[in-house]
Amino acid sequence: MQSVKLFYNKYNYPKVNQFTPRQRKHHVNIMNEILGLAGLSLSNIKNKRILDAGCGTGDKSVLLAKSGAIVTAIDFSEGQLKEAKLRAQKEFGNKSNIKFSQKDLIKDDLSDLAKTEKEKFDLIICLGVLHHTENPKLGFNKLVKLLNKKGIIILGLYHKYSRLKYKLFRSFIHLFVSRDPERIMLWLRKSFIGKLLSRGTSEPTLYDRYCVPYESYHTLNEVIGWFNNASFDLIGYSDNAKGFAPFKILNRKTIFFVAGRKRLSKKELLGLLKDEEKDNQFLVEIQRKHRSVTKW
């Protein structure tokens, strides 16, 4: 969506501050909570092939790469990618193991990101991205084709009900104030109502909350439907997605997270079990030889 692309070219997001140990720890904790939905953590993703679909300013990509993952980071905004590359350069110098690529999830062919089964991804994260596209379900379906047989995907989406209050405020602002981000921000700073809406909220969050030209809203049951249609099993979701959906209007957190894994056919499952059995036999043989050498 061109209007969203132009917005993020000018207003990079997210602006994650990691200047102090406390800020860095907070960022690590958030990522571990999200990865934990799939039984993962930053401590056990070393050498995993990960696609950060909609990498933004690169904060997630850099953190994953620092944990030893082999990261591919894509975004449709050249402004976002420029910021992400600078972040990676600052962290790794010329030894970054992050591969950056400009891609539109909806319009572009993504197959060149994983041309062979070996190149397919162990994990895809797509956090706060699909709800800014014109067809989130299509974006999801294109992404899951890039996963290997054991692949996992984690999504982050705006909740239909917990985001409702901001949807109403956005509609009011766009109708009676302006759609121009600078005019919106000026109104938020100067007007009485604007000051109430913006109190205690960082400027980047205000831009994301009220100024992005387009966003859509979703529910857990809707995403489960996507998973079923794509032959995926639900393996975890965030606490703020549990329970009766309309009650989520009371939630402070407006984004929910869902993790799913490819549903294997009986043939694929048997093949994986045989592979694991071979790996176990190989390990037993290595251990046996190690004991023999030690004894000698």
Image: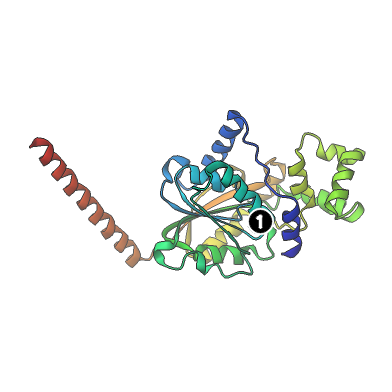
Q: Position of residue 279 (x, y in %)?
A: 25, 53
Tally the marks: 1
Let me know if residue 12 appears in the view.
yes
The residue at the far front in this view is 94
Is residue 101 found left or right of 7 in the rendered image?
A: left
Towards the viewer: 185 or 257: 185
**Residue sitting at 65 percent across and 61 percent down?**
76
Q: Residues within 10 Å of mark 1 (few under 14, many from 20)?
A: some
Residue at 14 percent across and 45 percent down: it is 289
Q: Is residue 45 above or below residue 146?
A: above
Left or right: residue 295 compared with residue 59: left
**Which residue is at the far left?**
296
Nearest the viewer among 244 and 265 is: 265
Q: Nearer the viewer, residue 224 or 288?
A: 288
| Scheme by which the image is coloured | rainbow
Quadrant location, the N terminus: bottom right
Return the x and y of residue 110 as percentages of the image width and height.
55, 67
Q: Residue 278 sits in which quadrant?
A: bottom left
- Whether residue 35 is visible, yes or no, is no
Rendered position, 244 above or below 222: above
- Vertical comparison of 185 with 225: above or below: above
Residue 252 place in picture, x, y as percent: 70, 40
Q: Position of residue 221 (x, y in %)?
A: 59, 56
In which quadrant is the C terminus drawn?
Answer: top left
Q: Is residue 107 above or below residue 121?
A: below
Judged from the image, the secondary structure of the residue bearing numbered disc 1 is: loop
Q: Nearer the viewer, residue 168 or 42?
A: 42
**Image-based side of 263 in relation to 228, left or right:** left
Please name the residue that numbered disc 1 is placed on: 218
